Image (cartoon, helix red, strand yellow):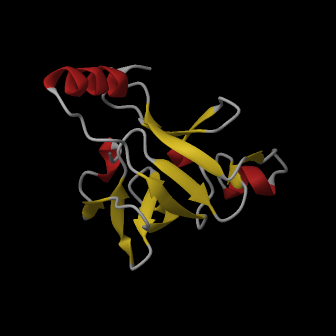
Amino acid sequence: MCDYSLHHVNSRPAKVGDKLTTHDFNTGTRGFAAAEDPTMAVCVLPGTELAFSDKVTCGHSRLTDFLGWRTKTFAPTAIFRQIHKDEPFRHHDALEFPDGQTVLLTALHVDQTAAVLQLPAPPKSAGEMEAQTRAAYAG
């Protein structure tokens, strides 16, 4: 999915094998941009598995880094999640790391590259579709 502040940016769905870059779209959020076009937001489905080229770093901004506030580092693999779905004007796009920590995508430093390893399995029945919908809106 793409956070609400990216709804007015050109976008496309993620595909297995995509090379993505964390990007500041100047809309109040950061997200994934397509390697072939940095102005194209790539919308990722909850449950998508990602592998970064290096450990993932995050912090509030370059200013906080300049002031010496600590940058957090995470494992180079993550699963895309959506959180706070019941709050419409809050960022939803997040990454869940192997240690169980969840970080908003908009908190990641820009210019980090990731590959889409696996998309979530599509539902095979109406019951599975309902369960995935509930899971996507939980949090």
Residue at point 30%, 27% (across, down): 132
**Residue 41: x, y in percent?**
35, 62
**Residue at the farthest front position:** 124
Quadrant location of the N terminus? top left
Give whichever of 17, 54 is nearer the camera.
17
Say how many tags the image has. 0
Quadrant location of the C terminus? top left
**Residue 129: x, y in percent?**
21, 28
**Residue at the farthest right position:** 68
Residue at point 68%, 53% (across, down): 76
Residue at point 62%, 59% (across, down): 52
Quadrant for residue 83, please give it.
top left
**Residue 22: x, y in percent?**
52, 61
Quadrant for residue 90, please give it.
top left
Q: Is residue 70 left or right of residue 47?
A: right
Residue 87 can be seen in this image: no
